[in-house]
Image (cartoon, rainbow, N blue to C red):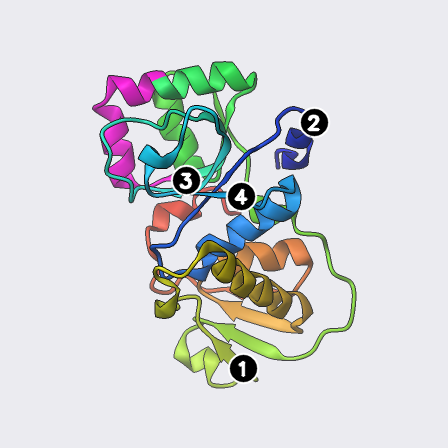
Amino acid sequence: MFDYGNLNDIFKFTHLPATSNTINIGDDIQVECAARLWHTRTYVERDDFNTWKSDMIIPFFGWYGYDLSNHPPKADCVLVSFHLCIDMMKRIAKSSEFKDWLRYSVKNQGFPAMARDTSTMNFIRQLGIDCEFGGCVTQTLERYDGDRSGIISIDAPEEIAISCDNKYTQIMHHLRNMPYEQRLELAAERIDVYKTAKHIHTSKLHTYLPCKALGTPVTFYKYKIFEPHRLSGLI
């Protein structure tokens, strides 16, 4: 995995891309990990590039596809730990402006783009732009070696979840339009659940990945997977 911590020695990020629109706490877990890593607690709306101003320096990490603007962001962006959904790939492939922005960003940051998955990596490479598999920012969580208790389901198949001590879901409808800070408080609480569990069963990528970083025993089920190509590079 690319050493994302070293970026603190090169850049001073002014904002982190966060979302107020989704119902998936996995989005916020990634932002919380980034905030701890890069010591930044100022946010900009991930899904509205029009809010990314030219005086901002932003790590372009996480999931991209909801923004529907016809132009890339004006901020200086560092392309790390990012995933492009299929629709976003199609938009970029048709836009010389987006492709020029990607080329400029990679040249400006001084090292290849670092994709979160190999599907995104392969797409960027097909554009003739340097890109490597850098892994997910959630992998920067510190390993936990303390006491553990409880077998937990996070959206595991029902036949597995029924025998677990506790059941949670990563899909939380009340998150939508909640302030960033409040969403990230919930994300931090969820990371604590992952950290101290004895074993977790999950079908969610951004439960599985934090657990691997924390050293929490985890079993992953390919069950009702949203955008299966996000799993490319997982092994």
Of badges 3 and 4, the one in the foreground is 4
Q: Tell me the distance, in whole angstroms, between the alpha carbons under discs 1 and 4.
A: 33 Å
* Residue 9 tag number: 2
Determine which quarter of the picture holds residue 48.
top left
Which residue shows up at 56% across the image and 76% down it?
152
Measured Cα–Cα span from mark 1 to mark 2? 41 Å
Residue 166 image label:
1
Q: Earlier in the sequence, mark 3 or mark 2?
A: 2
In the image, what residue type sits under mark 1?
Asn
Residue 178 falls in which quadrant of the image?
Answer: bottom left
Q: Is residue 170 above or below residue 157?
A: above
Which tag, 1 or 2, sits closer to the chain's start? Answer: 2
**Dot placed on the residue nearer the N-terminal end, 1 or 4:** 4
Inspect the image, locate mark 2, and give the three-letter code of the amino acid beneath it. Answer: Asp
For marks 1 and 3, give the CA distance: 31 Å
Q: CA distance from mark 3 to mark 4?
A: 22 Å
The residue carrying pointer 2 sits among few (fewer than 14), some (14 to 19) or many (20 or more) residues within 10 Å by Cα, namely few
Residue hosting label 4 = 42
Which residue is the site of mark 3? 83
Secondary structure mainly formed by the magenta segment: helix
Q: Secondary structure at mark 4?
A: loop
List x then y, in percent, for residue 89.
29, 33
Q: Earlier in the sequence, mark 1 or mark 3?
A: 3
